[in-house]
Amino acid sequence: MKTKTSGGVEANSICLNGHSKRLVHIRYKDHIEFKNTSHKLYFDVNVREVVGWVVLETDEYLFLLYDRSVDPLPHEASESGLILIKSDIIEMKEIK
C-alpha cells in the first residue's frame, strides 16, 4: 500500500512517530566530496555500512534512523539518520 507524505511523496511504507520496528543492516556506496584541491583524485567507490530503523521507504530512497531516544526528551528536535538512494544500496538485511 502506498501512502502520500505531507510533502506529497508517495511512500511504500511510513512510520510517522519515528519508532519503526523494522531494524536493518545496510551496506551502501557513499558519495565522496572533494574541493579546493590542485591534485587529481582517483578514488574507488567508498562502501560504508549502517544499522538503523526504516522510517520511510519510496521507490527511490530509504529514510533510516540510526540514533533515537526511547522516550523523546523535551529539548530534542529530531533524531539522527540517513536518506539513502536505493540504487546505491549494495546489500540490506533485516535484523530480527
Image: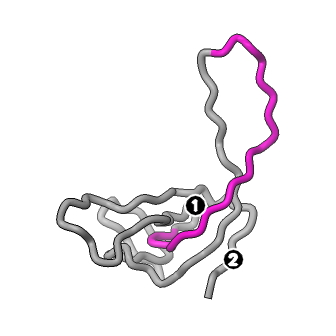
Q: In the figure, 23 relative to 77: above or below? A: below
Q: Position of residue 18 (x, y in %)?
A: 37, 73
What colouring style does the render use? one colour
Q: Whole-Å distance between the Cαs marked 2 and 1?
A: 18 Å
The three-letter code of the residue at mark 1 reads Glu
Q: Are there few (<14), some (14-19), or many (20+) residues within 10 Å of tag 2?
A: few
Q: Which residue is mark 2?
A: 93
Query: In this picture, which residue range is highlighted in magenta?
Result: 37-57
Identity of the residue furthest to the top in this view: 38
The three-letter code of the residue at mark 2 reads Lys
Q: Is residue 76 magenta?
A: no
Q: Is residue 44 magenta?
A: yes
Q: Quadrant of residue 28?
A: bottom right
Q: Position of residue 25 (x, y in %)?
A: 65, 71
Q: Earlier in the sequence, mark 2 or mark 1?
A: 1
Q: Are there few (<14), some (14-19), or many (20+) residues within 10 Å of tag 1?
A: few
Q: Secondary structure at mark 2?
A: strand
- Position of 20 with respect to 70 (left or right) is right
Q: Quadrant of residue 51?
A: bottom right
Identity of the residue furthest to the left in this view: 74
Pair 2/1: label in front: 2
Q: Which residue is mark 1?
A: 60
Identity of the residue furthest to the bottom in this view: 96
Q: Position of residue 91 (x, y in %)?
A: 74, 67
Answer yes or no: do the residues labelled 2 and 1 have beta carbons within 8 Å? no
